[in-house]
Image: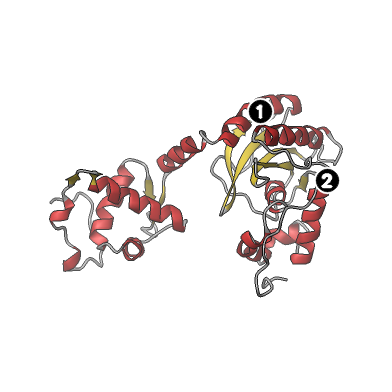
Amino acid sequence: MPIDDPLPPDTSPEDLPTEDATPERTSAGIQSAEIALSVLSAMAHAGGAHAVSELGRQLGMPRAKVHRYLVSLERMGFVEQDPASARYRLGAQALHVGLSALSDVDFVREGSNLLPKLAERLNESVFLSIWTARGPVIVRWEDSGRPVAVNVRVGSVMPLLNSATGQACAAWVPEIQIVSLIDRELRGPGAGKAGLTDWLNCRARWQAVRQEGVARIGGTLVHGIDSVAVPVLDSQGKLAGAITALGLSSVFDSSLEGPASRLLREAGRTLSLRLGYHGQALTAGAAAPKRGRRPRTAPESA
């Protein structure tokens, strides 16, 4: 079977195409489609960029076979290859499909309906993030009459310590779920910029966020940009995501009782109620979430 793109240089004879290269129809569906989706699923599960050989080992599949599927997925925009490293990562079409699926989630649909009015009332850019195992991911963005130039947009994963979005989420997630994420960020430069250098600092900040009902960052993630964020909880009291407003430090009021904090608290309460949350209000005096079982050993940054 002719292959338009060259095979990886380390291809061995057993990797060469066999009769299974031809799509096989079964009573349950098309096998080649299932294999292509398994390649995408493996990439999504691991995250980052992947070598063909790595994906082959993960999937128990010959490298040449994996490469053929990657070539087809690249043509359709589901993956893209870094010319320098020859590694593959998920492409724009994969993001588009993922975000389309998320649009059917109540939180994303309801939150998206709130954003335009919120941006208009604040005259600032606002965005919606959904909570994932990797952290909060931006799924909707609404610019105002004075948009800001930042390098985070739809699809960006926000840091937990050096962003208002991340702090708003971390304050409401059981600690056991974010130990590795926090430890990694504590070793980087961003946490120190936010005044968070160890677990004691982090816990104190999360407690303040829960008491105040809002998280605030002043120019530490993006110089000259301040932001305010609030959590949104679902019917079970679990974190669904966050709503964030941001603007130029020279004009954006990120004070605790400023318009951004006030309107975001209101929006967070409204959206949480629409998702079925009927617990204690997400304002001053809010109870801490259940933190879950702590690790048997203390986090390495504690």
Q: In this rendered view, identify the residue nearer to me: 265 or 273.
A: 273
153 up-or-down from 190: above or below: above
Residue at the spot 62% in from the left edge and 27% down from the top edge: 113
Q: Is residue 58 left or right of residue 1?
A: right
**Res. 8 visible in picture:** no
Residue at the spot 62% in from the left edge and 59% down from the top edge: 177
What residue sits right under mark 1 in the picture?
Answer: 114
Where residue 111 sits in the image (x, y, percent)? Answer: 63, 32
Identify the image's colour scheme: rainbow, by chain, secondary structure or one colour: secondary structure
Residue at the spot 77% in from the left edge and 60% down from the top edge: 203
Identified by mark 2, the residue type is: Glu
Q: In this rendered view, identify the residue nearer to me: 8 or 57.
A: 57
**Mark pair 2, 1: CA separation:** 22 Å
Question: Mark 2 packing: few (<14 Cα in 10 Å), some, or many (20+)?
Answer: some
Classify mark 1: helix, strand or loop.
helix
Where residue 100 sits in the image (x, y, percent)? Answer: 47, 35
**Res. 113 visible in picture:** yes
Where residue 184 sits in the image (x, y, percent)? Answer: 62, 65
Where residue 132 sits in the image (x, y, percent)? Answer: 57, 50
What residue sits right under mark 2 in the picture?
Answer: 212
